[in-house]
Image (cartoon, grey):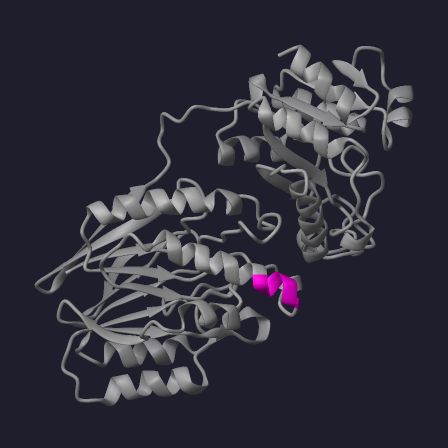
Amino acid sequence: MKIAHISDFHLRHHLPGTSTIPRRLSRHMPDLISQAVDRIRRESPDLVVVTGDLVDHPFYGMHDAELIALSEKDLRLVRECFAPLTCPVAFLYGNHDHPEAFHRVYGDLPADFHVAGHRVLLFFDDEVDANFPQRMGAQRERFIAAMNDDDASPQIHLQHYLVTPQRTGGYPHAYREAGSIKKALLADSRVRLVLSGHYHKGDSLFREGHVHIANAPAFGEPPHPFRIYDLSGTGIDQHEFEMRSSAVQRRRAVFLDRDGTLSPAPAYRTGPDAFSLLPGAAEALAKLKRAGYALVVVSNQTAVGQGYVTTETVGAVNDRMAALLELSGVELDGVYCRYGSQNAVVPEHRTDRPETKPSPAMLYAAAEDLDLELSGSLMVGDRKTDIDAGRNAGCRASILVKTGSGPEALAKMRPGHADFVAGDLADATAWILENG
């Protein structure tokens, strides 16, 4: 038996914006998933397993009817990507999927079926208190029944969350009652393979007792991996594939500050309703996009560390920005935010080495994730910290715009510190296009 295993796409296509964790390349997923499906098809698997977080439904919009409808469209898009396969495909939802929307799209598929002499069992579990997942209600009843019935077929168990290993500290990826679930699996000689997603670093195939266990790495993050498991006799072999080529052509980018450069005023303390675009900003970005530049927003959002808002509020503002840009046919390639500072009141964001501008950390991260050539890229912003971030990253040029805090920044900067001073983003765009 041969099984393909792929997980954690965090796709957004109809949903606006991107994941709040920018390394999850939400808007690149449709093409990458289709490429992966084509590669998987050539392996001729007997079963394909997709262990959750198919889309990246924003947590702030779990009860928003409009976002739920868009999420459902994205879930249908994922299913369409797998349509070329002729073997069964087992889909699970994760904590970033909307459960009701998922069941409307995938509810016709079986959660208990046989393939290639094996019984495949899917468990649809949820996070409860403090982000701990737990197997409850009907799912627990199904699990107990499967452990006690008379079907002698070897079993493959699928779930989004981890049965093992249990890690201490940080985000709880494993079930609250993981020890109990693991004990039951190890006590049943029919259980052969247990597959999960959720833990983005993944765990390579390992064995406890007679049970093989693997937790897939996130496909949504570079280098976009998926796995093939070959089951023969009592053994299982794992093969990992990556969709990113080491010989990829690197693109030039225009890095953009958000508040004061794209928008007239910061919305970080008031939320998405207060966000708007500066006149001409969308049209300027459209010109840059047509010229082949990747568009990446890099924004200091220390209000999170200072306790004014959460990262979800920042994400909601960024999604509003993306939705407004989409009205002009503009799609951003990435949005990177940093929240920490030395005087942060939220402990996890207090740091002596902040990655906010003028640090080039956000630009470096985007270059790695999106295959960008920093030496051919440009930085545009309304503060000296923007100019310095571009210089520190080795960008070809850094441009100050006289919108937002631009006039105050210009008055304090020495002549020539910025490579060009533009009236606004449209003016900056004209300079970029003229100077190649």
Residue furthest front as drawn: 328
- Return the x and y of residue 204 as percentages of the image width and height: 30, 54
Q: Of 403 and 192, which appears nearest the observer? A: 403
The residue drawn where x is 76% and y is 35% is 262
Res 408 seen here = yes
Eyeballing the image, is 228 above or below 181? above
- The answer to which of 55 and 192 lies nearer the viewer is 55
* Location of residue 25 in the rendering, given as x and y in whole percent from the top left corner: 51, 44
**Of 218 and 163, the residue lying toward us:** 218
The quadrant in which the N terminus is found is bottom left
Residue 353 visible in the current orientation? no
240 sits to left or right of 362: left
Say above or below: 142 vs 304. Answer: below
Residue at 19% across, 60% down: 46
Image quarter where the C terminus lies is top right
Residue drawn at x 40%, y 75% is: 178
Count of numbered circles in the view: 0
- The magenta segment is 64-69
**Is 411 in the magenta?**
no
When the figure is inspected, residue 142 is found, relative to residue 197, above or below; the finding is below
Q: Magenta: predominant secondary structure element?
A: helix
Q: With 143 as the anchor, is 234 left or right in this view? A: left
Task: Say left or right for 69 vs 76.
Answer: right
Q: Image quarter for residue 402?
A: top right
- Percent across and percent down for residue 18 are 58, 48
Figure quadrant of residue 293: top right
Picture quadrant of residue 395: top right
Q: In this view, does 60 lie above or below 247?
A: below
Residue 432 coordinates in the image, percent (x, y)? 68, 16
